[in-house]
Image (cartoon, coloured by chain):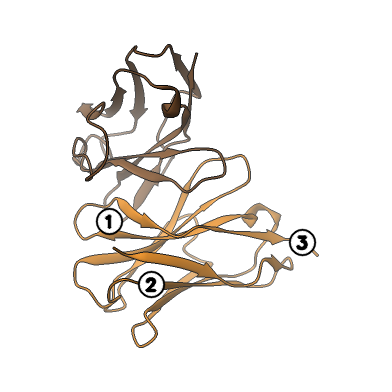
Chain colours: A brown, B orange
């Protein structure tokens, strides 16, 4: 069970859209629609932003969206805002009742 | 709304056992809707799933930690616990407890996290 692969960093200007990728294998991301995404500001608790690939919990802005193609899941943030600057982690069900996280992506809002 | 709070020693000696408890409020831990889990984050690093438990006692662990991890539940106290044996400095991390809605495999409620340092 290897960690999912995310870019170490991405950046964008306010108002732009950015996409963070999360690459796994046919044993995890590719086999299940059970990818979740978490936002974590420095020193804070992770917050669930997307679950089951593309669903948003109550209270999460519709600027956040999730998708999947093959073994790669993606988180897209549209209309980038300064408060979106944070670390983002993907997590996938990996079969046999196990979970695996990605290494995390630092989003910088320029 | 569920609230979770971790508690336990903040300093553990190498080779000893790390023990943490998560107290759940706002709902019964015996709910059939939720699983209860542990996640950790070494300083400056990413998140790592440790394992989770159902109120019935069924447990599921990260294969890389399975030989050292035990998660248990005490429904009478609305708590669940983590034990990690034979710790080393590599186990120094912020430990979070969390809950996820059955079937979603996503943690919707988290504790505040507690930093556990392994050092002599």
Considering the numbered disc 2 on the image, is that residue within a helix, a strand or a loop? Answer: strand
Q: Position of residue B59 (x, y in %)?
A: 34, 70
Alpha carbon separation for disc pair 2 and 3: 29 Å
Q: Residue at x 34, y 11 (%)?
A: A16
Q: Is residue B95 above or below residue A70?
A: below
Tag of residue A96: 1
**Where residue B119 is drawn, which disc sits there?**
3
Residue reaching furthest to the bottom:
B76
Q: Secondary structure at mark 1?
A: loop
Crowd around label 1: few <14 · some 14–19 · many ≥20 (10 Å) = few
Residue hosting label 2: B24
Cα distance, mark 2 to mark 1? 26 Å
Q: Which marked residue is nearer to the observer: mark 3 or mark 1?
A: 3
Viewer-side label of 2, 1: 2
Q: Chain of mark 1?
A: A
Instruction: Decide: few, some or many residues near mark 3? Use Cα within 10 Å; few <14, some 14-19, many ≥20.
Output: few
- Any part of residue B60 in sight: no
Same chain for mark 2 and mark 1? The answer is no
The reply, left or right, for residue A70 in relation to residue B119 is left
Q: Chain of mark 2?
A: B
Alpha carbon distance from label 3 to label 1: 34 Å
Tell which of B84 and B117 is nearer to you: B117
Q: Give the number of the mark in front: 2 or 3.
A: 2
Q: Secondary structure at mark 3?
A: loop
Residues beneath discs 2 and 3 located on the same chain:
yes
Quadrant position of residue B84: bottom right
Q: In the rendered view, tell whether residue B79 sits above or below residue A67.
A: below
Whether residue B47 is situated above or below residue B5 in the rendered picture: above
Front position in the image: A85 or B48: A85
Identity of the residue drawn at 21% across and 28% down: A67
Residue at 51% from the left image edge and 45% from the top image edge: A44
Q: Is residue B32 left or right of residue B16?
A: left
């Amino acid at each position: 069970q290897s960690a999912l692969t995310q870019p170490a960093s991405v950046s964008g200007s306010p108002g732009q859209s950015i996409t963070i990728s999360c690459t796994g294998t046919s044993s995890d991301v590719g086999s299940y629609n059970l990818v979740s995404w978490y936002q974590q500001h420095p020193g804070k608790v992770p917050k669930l932003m997307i679950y089951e690939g593309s669903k948003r919990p109550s209270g999460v802005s519709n600027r956040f969206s999730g998708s999947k193609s093959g073994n790669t899941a993606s988180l897209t943030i549209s209309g980038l805002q300064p408060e979106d600057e944070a670390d983002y982690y993907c997590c996938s069900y990996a079969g046999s009742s196990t979970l695996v996280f990605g290494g995390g992506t630092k989003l910088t809002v320029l | 709304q569920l609230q979770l709070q971790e508690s336990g020693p903040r300093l553990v000696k190498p080779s000893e056992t790390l023990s943490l408890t998560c107290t759940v409020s706002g709902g019964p831990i015996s709910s059939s809707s939720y699983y209860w889990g542990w996640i950790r984050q070494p300083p400056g690093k990413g998140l790592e799933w440790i394992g989770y438990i159902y109120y019935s006692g069924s447990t599921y662990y990260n294969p890389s930690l399975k030989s050292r991890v035990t998660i248990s539940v005490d429904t009478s106290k609305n708590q669940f616990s983590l034990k990690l044996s034979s710790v080393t400095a590599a186990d120094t991390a912020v430990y979070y407890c969390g809950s996820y809605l059955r079937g979603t495999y996503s943690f919707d409620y988290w504790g505040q996290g507690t930093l556990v340092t392994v050092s002599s």
